[in-house]
Image: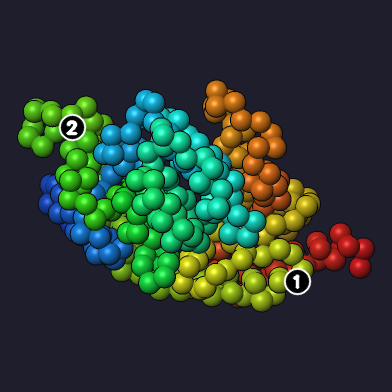
Amino acid sequence: MIPMVDLKEELETLKEPILKSLIDVLESGEYILGKKGKEIENLIATYIGTPYGIGVGNGTDALYLSLRSLDIGPGDEVITTPFTFFATGEAIAQVGAKPVFVDIENDTYNINPTKIREKITSNTKAIIVVHLYGQAAKMTEIMELAEEFNLKVIEDACQAIGTEYRGKRVGGIGDIGCFSFFPSKNLGAYGDGGMIVTKHKNLYEKISILRNHGSTIKYRHSLIGINSRLDEFQAAIVLVKFKYLDIFLHKRKEVARRYTEELKGIIKTPSIATTKEHTFHQYCVELDKRDQLSNFLQQHEIASAIYYPIPLHLQEAFRYLNYQKGDFPVAERVANKILALPIFPSMTFKQQDKVISVLKSFIEKDSGK
């Protein structure tokens, strides 16, 4: 079976340094908020181009804590995309604010900046921008709107570590950037983990308190916080893998380039602004008979996945927002047509050629050739 991502192969490549790093943690006796966590916080902050990094329990907590640090809560509205993983909208609801959705672009699948203005009200406090699949959203237009209306910008860069936008890495452009170390991410742990970066010292200090039960001194709590600290073992794993991040991103881009060369004109392939604006957490094609293609690939021992089959505005959990089918036609269309193909740094030409060959045979069969 050709998997969506091959973590076993990755472990075989990095097993020795990862085991050594884990042993370092065991021998140190530091398991929570230790040296490895602080080191990866500093490295990623520097990599993104911000002075501050805060390790947290996962990418969802990163979004939640970011909203809390901005004092966003009941009565406030936060604009975001309906075409994203559930956690983006979930975090807004968790702080008591109202998610306000804006449709996406036809080509990049990111939030459409031209449609944001009409959704801004006196209650709007922030925009959560998702850099979907590893491609940067149009941050120039979004930041101009944020400045005009005095809005905060949180970048959900959970799928986009290393992605650049006009010379800056995403996550470091807005007020706060959020990253996930979920195992399948481009920089993944072997469990849950996440990171927040910011250029603002006051937000760094507040998030650092919020992630640790609202405390800086043991048993003294200045805020109502949560328990969301990056585990020292996961920090140790991410530290090792971080050294290879740019190499792995380059390999992802090469896999994506080969897919596009072979499939362009046959099926709708990703629209890419520049190679530096897409790091291909997913490589997604778009077609009417998406489910049939997925089944066909499965029959030939090739994995595929749908990211995402139901837009947020049509999720049962958000029924209280009173959105209807047809409110966001682009997101709804894409949700019915998008399919992710296998992509990972260690993917061989042989594996990729099989995916391409099987996909082409499906298209030819479907067209009656």
Instruction: Pinpoint residue 93: horizontal percent, then vertical percent.
Output: 43, 30
**x 38%, y 72%: residue:** 167
Instruction: Pinpoint residue 304: horizontal percent, then vertical percent.
Output: 64, 54
| Neighbours of disc 1 within 10 Å: few (<14), some (14-19), many (20+) | few
Q: Amino acid at mark 1?
A: Gly
Task: Give the residue at the far top of this rendering.
Answer: 320
Horizontal side of 146 relative to 253 (left or right) equals: left
Instruction: Pinpoint residue 105: horizontal percent, then vertical percent.
Output: 60, 55
Q: Quadrant of residue 14?
A: bottom left
Task: Depth check: give the residue in front, 202 or 296.
Answer: 202
**x 66%, y 76%: residue:** 261
Q: Amino acid at mark 2?
A: Gly
Residue 305 in sight here: yes
Q: Secondary structure at mark 2?
A: loop
Q: Secondary structure at mark 1?
A: loop
Task: Point out the image quarter for the C terminus.
Answer: bottom right
Instruction: Pinpoint residue 103: horizontal percent, then vertical percent.
Output: 59, 46
**x 23%, y 41%: residue:** 207
Horizontal side of 146 relative to 205 (left or right) equals: right
Horizontal side of 154 relative to 89 (left or right) equals: left
**x 9%, y 27%: residue:** 219
| Neighbours of disc 2 within 10 Å: few (<14), some (14-19), many (20+) | many
Horizontal side of 230 relative to 322 (left or right) equals: left
Residue at mark 2: 214
Dot 1 or dot 2: first in sequence order is 2
Residue at mark 1: 265
Task: Point out the image quarter for the N terminus.
Answer: bottom right
